[in-house]
Image (cartoon, helix red, strand yellow):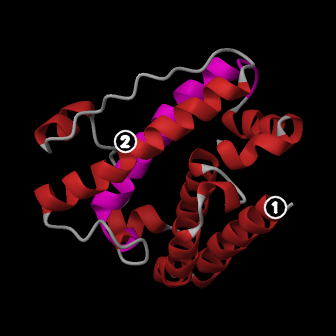
Amino acid sequence: MAHTFTTTALSRLGREARRRNDPAYFLDRFGPMHRRWHSLSPNARPLGFLLYHWHVIRAFETAGGPRFVGGGSIAPYTPANFAAFGWPYNVTAETSAGDVDSLADFSFEIEMWHNDAHMAIGMATETPMMDPEENIWYLPFWRLHYFIDARFIQQLRRFDTRGTVRRKIRRLVARQHSDVARI
Protein backbone atom coordinates (compact mmCIF):
# COMPACT_ATOMS: atom_id res chain seq x y z
CA MET A 1 0.00 0.00 0.00
CA ALA A 2 2.83 2.39 -0.85
CA HIS A 3 0.36 4.58 -2.70
CA THR A 4 -1.47 5.19 0.60
CA PHE A 5 1.77 6.40 2.18
CA THR A 6 2.34 8.73 -0.77
CA THR A 7 -1.15 10.20 -0.80
CA THR A 8 -1.18 10.56 2.98
CA ALA A 9 2.19 12.33 2.95
CA LEU A 10 1.01 14.76 0.26
CA SER A 11 -2.25 15.46 2.07
CA ARG A 12 -0.51 16.05 5.40
CA LEU A 13 2.02 18.34 3.76
CA GLY A 14 -0.74 20.42 2.18
CA ARG A 15 -2.62 20.68 5.48
CA GLU A 16 0.52 21.62 7.42
CA ALA A 17 1.38 24.36 4.92
CA ARG A 18 -2.19 25.68 5.20
CA ARG A 19 -1.98 25.59 9.02
CA ARG A 20 1.24 27.60 8.81
CA ASN A 21 -0.25 29.86 6.12
CA ASP A 22 2.93 29.17 4.19
CA PRO A 23 2.65 27.70 0.66
CA ALA A 24 6.45 27.86 0.35
CA TYR A 25 6.59 25.30 3.18
CA PHE A 26 4.72 22.92 0.88
CA LEU A 27 6.98 23.59 -2.12
CA ASP A 28 10.16 23.27 -0.05
CA ARG A 29 9.18 19.84 1.19
CA PHE A 30 7.41 18.65 -1.93
CA GLY A 31 10.44 19.32 -4.16
CA PRO A 32 12.46 16.31 -2.95
CA MET A 33 9.36 14.09 -3.05
CA HIS A 34 8.73 15.17 -6.64
CA ARG A 35 12.34 14.51 -7.63
CA ARG A 36 12.20 11.06 -6.06
CA TRP A 37 8.94 10.12 -7.79
CA HIS A 38 10.37 11.13 -11.16
CA SER A 39 13.57 9.18 -10.49
CA LEU A 40 11.65 5.91 -10.10
CA SER A 41 11.01 3.66 -13.05
CA PRO A 42 7.30 3.45 -13.90
CA ASN A 43 7.18 -0.10 -12.52
CA ALA A 44 8.52 1.08 -9.14
CA ARG A 45 6.15 4.02 -8.65
CA PRO A 46 3.48 3.66 -5.98
CA LEU A 47 1.08 5.75 -8.08
CA GLY A 48 0.94 6.28 -11.80
CA PHE A 49 1.48 9.61 -13.49
CA LEU A 50 -2.12 10.86 -13.50
CA LEU A 51 -3.09 9.74 -10.00
CA TYR A 52 0.14 11.06 -8.48
CA HIS A 53 -0.22 14.49 -10.05
CA TRP A 54 -3.95 14.62 -9.24
CA HIS A 55 -3.05 14.19 -5.55
CA VAL A 56 -0.20 16.70 -5.90
CA ILE A 57 -2.57 19.35 -7.24
CA ARG A 58 -5.07 18.75 -4.42
CA ALA A 59 -2.29 19.14 -1.82
CA PHE A 60 -0.92 22.21 -3.62
CA GLU A 61 -4.39 23.79 -3.51
CA THR A 62 -4.84 22.92 0.17
CA ALA A 63 -1.48 24.57 0.88
CA GLY A 64 -2.56 27.78 -0.84
CA GLY A 65 -0.17 27.22 -3.73
CA PRO A 66 -2.30 28.92 -6.40
CA ARG A 67 -2.26 32.14 -4.37
CA PHE A 68 1.52 31.93 -3.95
CA VAL A 69 2.51 30.91 -7.49
CA GLY A 70 -0.35 32.19 -9.59
CA GLY A 71 -1.64 35.22 -7.72
CA GLY A 72 -4.86 33.47 -6.71
CA SER A 73 -5.63 30.93 -9.39
CA ILE A 74 -3.94 28.84 -12.04
CA ALA A 75 -5.15 29.12 -15.62
CA PRO A 76 -4.29 25.90 -17.44
CA TYR A 77 -2.48 26.15 -20.73
CA THR A 78 -4.64 25.62 -23.79
CA PRO A 79 -4.01 23.52 -26.90
CA ALA A 80 -3.30 26.81 -28.71
CA ASN A 81 -0.55 27.58 -26.18
CA PHE A 82 1.11 24.24 -26.84
CA ALA A 83 0.93 24.77 -30.58
CA ALA A 84 2.62 28.17 -30.09
CA PHE A 85 5.34 26.45 -28.01
CA GLY A 86 6.00 24.13 -30.95
CA TRP A 87 4.67 21.07 -29.13
CA PRO A 88 0.97 20.62 -29.99
CA TYR A 89 -1.21 18.49 -27.78
CA ASN A 90 -1.57 15.30 -29.80
CA VAL A 91 -2.63 12.61 -27.34
CA THR A 92 -5.21 10.43 -29.09
CA ALA A 93 -5.80 7.69 -26.51
CA GLU A 94 -9.29 7.72 -25.05
CA THR A 95 -10.78 5.89 -22.14
CA SER A 96 -13.73 3.53 -22.41
CA ALA A 97 -16.28 3.04 -19.65
CA GLY A 98 -14.94 0.65 -17.02
CA ASP A 99 -11.86 -0.25 -19.08
CA VAL A 100 -8.86 0.22 -16.80
CA ASP A 101 -6.42 -0.68 -19.58
CA SER A 102 -7.69 2.20 -21.71
CA LEU A 103 -7.24 4.58 -18.75
CA ALA A 104 -3.71 3.25 -18.23
CA ASP A 105 -2.98 3.72 -21.96
CA PHE A 106 -4.17 7.32 -21.73
CA SER A 107 -1.96 7.88 -18.68
CA PHE A 108 1.07 6.49 -20.52
CA GLU A 109 0.46 8.56 -23.66
CA ILE A 110 -0.10 11.84 -21.83
CA GLU A 111 2.97 11.27 -19.65
CA MET A 112 5.11 10.74 -22.76
CA TRP A 113 3.66 13.88 -24.37
CA HIS A 114 4.16 15.82 -21.11
CA ASN A 115 7.87 15.01 -20.92
CA ASP A 116 8.57 16.92 -24.13
CA ALA A 117 6.00 19.57 -23.24
CA HIS A 118 8.21 20.44 -20.27
CA MET A 119 11.10 21.08 -22.65
CA ALA A 120 9.00 23.10 -25.12
CA ILE A 121 7.52 25.27 -22.35
CA GLY A 122 10.94 25.82 -20.82
CA MET A 123 12.38 26.97 -24.12
CA ALA A 124 9.40 29.21 -24.91
CA THR A 125 9.13 30.81 -21.46
CA GLU A 126 12.76 30.63 -20.32
CA THR A 127 11.56 28.77 -17.23
CA PRO A 128 13.62 25.94 -15.70
CA MET A 129 11.12 23.17 -16.46
CA MET A 130 13.40 20.11 -16.46
CA ASP A 131 14.37 19.87 -12.77
CA PRO A 132 11.50 18.36 -10.73
CA GLU A 133 12.72 19.98 -7.54
CA GLU A 134 12.94 23.44 -9.07
CA ASN A 135 10.16 23.60 -11.69
CA ILE A 136 7.41 23.41 -9.05
CA TRP A 137 8.25 26.98 -8.01
CA TYR A 138 7.18 28.36 -11.40
CA LEU A 139 3.73 29.11 -12.78
CA PRO A 140 4.35 27.39 -16.16
CA PHE A 141 4.81 24.04 -14.36
CA TRP A 142 1.42 24.37 -12.69
CA ARG A 143 -0.29 25.61 -15.86
CA LEU A 144 0.95 22.47 -17.65
CA HIS A 145 -0.18 20.17 -14.86
CA TYR A 146 -3.56 21.85 -14.49
CA PHE A 147 -4.04 21.25 -18.23
CA ILE A 148 -3.10 17.58 -17.78
CA ASP A 149 -5.36 17.29 -14.72
CA ALA A 150 -8.29 18.61 -16.75
CA ARG A 151 -7.62 16.00 -19.47
CA PHE A 152 -7.44 13.31 -16.76
CA ILE A 153 -10.78 14.38 -15.32
CA GLN A 154 -12.35 14.26 -18.80
CA GLN A 155 -11.11 10.72 -19.29
CA LEU A 156 -12.05 9.71 -15.75
CA ARG A 157 -15.62 10.81 -16.48
CA ARG A 158 -15.64 8.52 -19.51
CA PHE A 159 -14.26 5.68 -17.39
CA ASP A 160 -16.75 6.13 -14.53
CA THR A 161 -19.92 8.17 -15.03
CA ARG A 162 -21.10 8.21 -11.40
CA GLY A 163 -20.39 10.72 -8.63
CA THR A 164 -17.78 13.36 -7.98
CA VAL A 165 -14.21 13.20 -9.19
CA ARG A 166 -13.04 12.42 -5.65
CA ARG A 167 -15.47 9.49 -5.46
CA LYS A 168 -14.39 8.27 -8.88
CA ILE A 169 -10.76 8.29 -7.66
CA ARG A 170 -11.70 6.41 -4.48
CA ARG A 171 -13.62 3.79 -6.46
CA LEU A 172 -10.80 3.45 -8.96
CA VAL A 173 -8.24 2.86 -6.21
CA ALA A 174 -10.49 0.45 -4.32
CA ARG A 175 -11.58 -1.60 -7.34
CA GLN A 176 -8.46 -1.42 -9.45
CA HIS A 177 -5.96 -1.48 -6.60
CA SER A 178 -3.36 -3.43 -8.52
CA ASP A 179 -3.51 -0.91 -11.39
CA VAL A 180 -2.98 2.39 -9.54
CA ALA A 181 0.70 2.43 -10.51
CA ARG A 182 -0.34 2.45 -14.20
CA ILE A 183 -2.76 5.38 -13.98
In the rendered structure, which amino acid carries the disc numbered 2? Trp
Whether residue 120 sits left or right of residue 142 in the image: it is left
**Badge 1 is on which residue?**
4
Whole-percent x and y of residue 149?
A: 49, 42
Q: Quadrant of residue 29?
A: bottom right
The disc, 1 or 2, on the residue closer to the chain's N-terminal end is: 1
| Relative vertical location of residue 48 with respect to residue 99 in this rendering, above or below | below
Which residue is depicted at the point 54% across and 78% down? 26
Q: Quadrant of residue 70?
A: bottom left
Which residue is depicted at the point 87% across and 34% down? 175
Magenta: main secondary structure: helix
Query: Magenta stretch?
Result: 136-163
| Relative vertical location of residue 95 with respect to residue 75 in this rendering, above or below | above
Residue 151 on the magenta span: yes
| Relative vertical location of residue 175 with respect to residue 161 in this rendering, above or below | below
Mark drawn on residue 113: 2
For the C terminus, the image quarter is top right
In the rendered structure, which amino acid carries the disc numbered 1? Thr
